Image (spheres, rainbow, N blue to C red):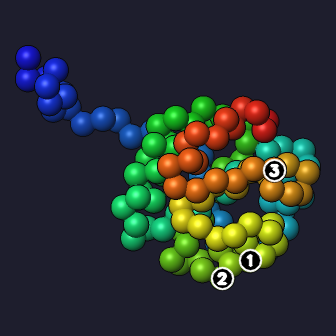
């Protein structure tokens, strides 16, 4: 009865995603080029924000495209210059958390906060 009410006391196994850490502006040109043959995703995350952490965890739980897209993780606090360049280069207003989907060198979709997990990623593959 208690398991039904409070859940299992066993810890939930954390899903590990194939993150590529986005730490330099040079990578942005590479991402744009690679997006011409394979969908590229950029997840912008603020490590000090509880909402950003919650959305990131939900995203990880739902993510199912391991081999169909490259998945970049951008720590906004440690790479603010890269984050600013993402906004400029891809013409997307900065938000956090934020997910950008790139195909053919341009952002084809993006969203932020809870709406990230409502994006139908399969539609862009």
The CA distance from mark 3 to mark 2 is 23 Å
Verify CB contact (< 8 Å) between mark 1 and mark 2.
Answer: yes
Q: Residues within 10 Å of mark 1 (few under 14, many from 20)?
A: some
- How much space separates mark 1 and mark 2, taking CA atoms? 6 Å
Horizontal and vertical percent for residue 10?
20, 32
**N-term mark: 3 or 2:** 2
Q: Which residue is drawn at 56% across and 47% down?
A: 115
Rendered image quadrant of residue 27: bottom right
Q: Please tell me which residue lies in front, 54 or 41.
A: 54
Q: What element carries label 3?
A: strand
- Asked where in the image residue 100 lies, by quadrant, the reply is bottom right
- Contact (CB < 8 A) between labels 3 and 2? no
Report which residue position mark 1 lands on: 85
Q: Is mark 2 on a helix, strand or loop?
A: helix
Local packing at callout 3 (Cα closer than 10 Å; few below 14, some 14-19, many 20+) is: few
Give how far apart the Cα atoms at labels 1 and 3 are: 17 Å
The residue identified by callout 3 is 108
Quick one: label 2, few (<14), some, or many (20+) residues within 10 Å?
A: few
Q: For numbered disc 1, what is the local secondary structure?
A: helix
Looking at this view, is 77 or 92 the one in front? 92
Which quadrant holds residue 26? bottom right
Q: Is residue 40 left or right of residue 14?
A: right
Give the quarter of the figure containing the N terminus. top left
Residue matched to label 2: 81
């Amino acid at each position: 009865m208690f398991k039904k009410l409070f859940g299992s006391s066993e810890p939930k196994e954390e899903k590990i995603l194939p993150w590529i850490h986005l730490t330099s502006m040079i990578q942005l040109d590479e991402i744009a080029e690679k997006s011409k043959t394979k969908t590229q995703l950029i997840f912008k995350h603020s490590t000090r924000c509880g909402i950003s952490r919650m959305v990131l965890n939900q995203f990880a739980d739902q993510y199912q495209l391991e081999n169909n897209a490259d998945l970049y993780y951008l720590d906004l606090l440690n790479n603010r210059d890269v984050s600013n360049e993402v906004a400029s280069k891809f013409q997307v207003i900065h938000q956090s958390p934020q997910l950008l989907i790139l195909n053919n060198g341009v952002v084809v979709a993006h969203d932020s906060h809870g709406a990230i997990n409502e994006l139908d990623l399969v539609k862009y593959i």
